[in-house]
Image: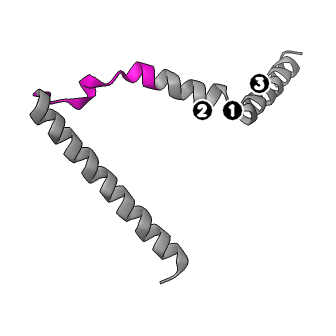
């Protein structure tokens, strides 16, 4: 097999293992606590805010890119109004 096929195979095995472990963990939580929906144990709003801060706000390249695009859009808008 070529190198790419092996890496694809390894990725598929890792993904399947992760899904199996999550399913087993959910089943364990259901047995232990009697909770049917594991998502009730998580605070999605807190996780989403943390991810937004880390991935979007702390990324200097993204902030610079957005700043330049906003400046370009503002310049185009002023040209259209003139």
Residues under labels 3 and 2: Cα distance? Answer: 19 Å
Magenta residue check for 67: no
Task: Give the class, few, some or many, for how many residues have Cα within 10 Å of label 2's Cα (few <14, many ≥20).
Answer: few
Is residue 21 or residue 73 the one in the foreground? 21
The span picked out in magenta is: 34-47
> Looking at the picture, how far across and down is residue 17, in whole percent?
31, 57
In the rendered view, does 32 fall on the left or right side of 41?
A: left
| Residue at the far bottom in the pictured view | 1
Frontmost of labels 3 and 2 is 2
Tell me which corner region of the image, top left, top right, bottom left or bottom right, holds residue 33: top left
Label 1 vs 3, first from the N-terminus: 1
Would you identify the image quadrant in which residue 41 lies? top left
Say few, some or many: other residues with alpha carbon within 10 Å of mark 1 (under 14 / 14 to 19 / 20 or more). Answer: few
Q: Which mark is residue 59?
A: 1
Please tell me which residue is depicted at 62% across the width and 29% down the height of the picture.
56
**Number of marks in the rendered image:** 3
> Where, quadrant-wise, is the C terminus in this rendering?
top right
Return the x and y of residue 79 as percentages of the image width and height.
88, 21
Q: Secondary structure at mark 1?
A: loop
Q: Is residue 42 magenta?
A: yes
Image height check: is 45 above or below 55?
above
Tell me if 54 is positioned left or right of 82 in this view: left
Q: Residue at x 52, y 81 (%)?
A: 2
Residue that extends furthest to the front in the rendered view of this protein: 32
Marker disc for residue 55: 2
> Which label's residue is closer to the chain start, 3 or 2?
2
Q: Residue under circle 3?
A: 70
Cα distance in 3D space between marks 2 and 1: 6 Å
């Amino acid at each position: 097999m070529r190198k790419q096929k092996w890496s694809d195979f390894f990725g598929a095995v890792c993904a399947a293992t992760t899904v199996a472990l999550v399913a087993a963990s959910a089943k364990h939580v259901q047995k232990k606590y009697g909770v049917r929906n594991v998502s009730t144990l998580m605070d999605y709003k807190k996780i989403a805010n943390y991810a937004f801060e880390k991935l979007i706000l702390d990324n200097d390249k993204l902030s610079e890119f957005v700043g330049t695009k906003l400046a370009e859009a503002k310049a185009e808008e002023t040209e259209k109004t003139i």
